[in-house]
């Protein structure tokens, strides 16, 4: 395992962390009254768009899982459309799961859906960028010893951390503290965001620490 590849992964992940921090800071210079808590839905949109754009650009530039097979323009268009459909289906699926876990069914529909979009950005979009619309590859990566590169190991860690962060973020909501961040879905979306950021930092450090034990199968 090359140290240069791990350093490149670390730099990429730190750039993503820095981008999320900027989404909470920069808009306040252009929008009076902007805060992550006070204008949370706006921040959810800004964060989702910025993280999505950055990840798409990084994967187009770095091409961590580049296939050696050449594909036609029509195939690329078909692949792109499939990715869009998969992402939208992921948003709907996360929305349904969140409702099943206790979110309001009719009230706060916008809030719930934007939270689902954020979760899809932190999880599904990463899979689409890395693996494409290939469900079998997704199952392989998230199975035991299924990762074939440090990028796929990072994908495992960030995805799990994002979902766990969202889950832990739900715990303070029913508590009678009357805090502004207990309003749905602020604590959950912040939990998912902090979980995703933690995963981005933990992943390259964990890979570096276990680099001698990690062995990746050839494709």
Image: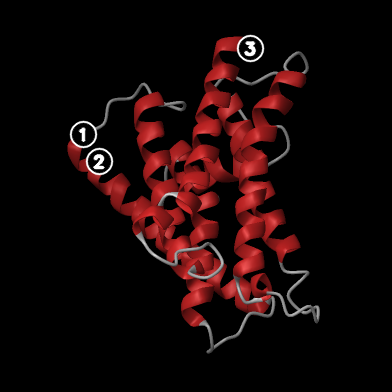
Is the residue under label 1 in contact with that under label 2 (CB below 8 Å)? yes
Residue 174: which numbered mark, if any? Answer: none
Residue nearest the observer in this picture, 182 or 208: 182
Left or right position of 120 against 201: left
Judge the density around disc 1: few (<14), some (14-19), many (≥20) Cα neighbours within 10 Å.
few
Quadrant of image for the N terminus: top right
What is the distance, in whole Å, between disc 3 and disc 2 at their CAs? 33 Å
Q: Where does residue 94 sit, x and y in percent of width and height?
A: 56, 66
Quarter residue 138 falls in: top right
Say which residue label 1 marks. Answer: 72
Q: Where does residue 171 sit, x and y in percent of width and height?
A: 78, 69
Q: Secondary structure at mark 3?
A: loop
- Name the residue located 51 percent from the left edge and 57 percent from the top edge: 120
Residue nearest the observer in this picture, 160 or 35: 35
Judge the density around disc 2: few (<14), some (14-19), many (≥20) Cα neighbours within 10 Å.
few
Q: Is residue 73 visible?
A: yes
- Name the residue located 68 percent from the left edge and 48 percent from the top edge: 160
Q: Secondary structure at mark 2?
A: helix
- Name the residue located 73 percent from the left edge and 37 percent from the top edge: 144
Colour theme: secondary structure
Say which residue label 2 marks. Answer: 75
Say which residue label 3 marks. Answer: 1
Mark 3 or 2 closer to N-term?
Answer: 3
Q: Where does residue 141 sit, x and y in percent of width and height?
A: 61, 38
Quarter residue 13 falls in: top right
């Amino acid at each position: 395992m090359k140290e240069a590849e791990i350093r490149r992964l670390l730099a990429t992940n730190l750039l993503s962390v820095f981008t999320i921090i900027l989404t909470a800071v920069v808009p306040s210079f252009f929008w009076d009254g902007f805060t992550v808590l006070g204008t949370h839905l706006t921040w959810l949109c800004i964060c989702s768009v910025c993280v999505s754009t950055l990840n798409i650009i990084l994967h187009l530039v770095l091409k961590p899982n580049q296939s050696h097979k050449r594909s036609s323009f029509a195939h690329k268009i078909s692949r792109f459309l499939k990715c869009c459909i998969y992402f939208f289906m992921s948003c709907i699926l996360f929305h349904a799961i969140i409702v099943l876990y206790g979110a309001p069914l009719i009230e706060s529909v916008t809030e719930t859906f934007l939270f689902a979009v954020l979760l899809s950005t932190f999880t599904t979009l990463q899979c689409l960028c890395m693996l494409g619309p290939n469900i079998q590859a997704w199952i392989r990566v998230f199975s035991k010893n299924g990762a074939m590169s440090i990028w796929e190991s990072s994908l495992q860690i960030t995805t799990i951390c994002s979902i766990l962060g969202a889950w832990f973020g739900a715990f303070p909501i029913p508590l009678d503290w009357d805090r502004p961040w207990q309003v749905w879905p602020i604590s959950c979306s912040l939990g998912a965001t902090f979980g995703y950021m933690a995963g981005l930092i933990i992943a390259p450090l964990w890979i570096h620490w276990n680099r001698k034990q990690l062995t990746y199968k050839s494709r």
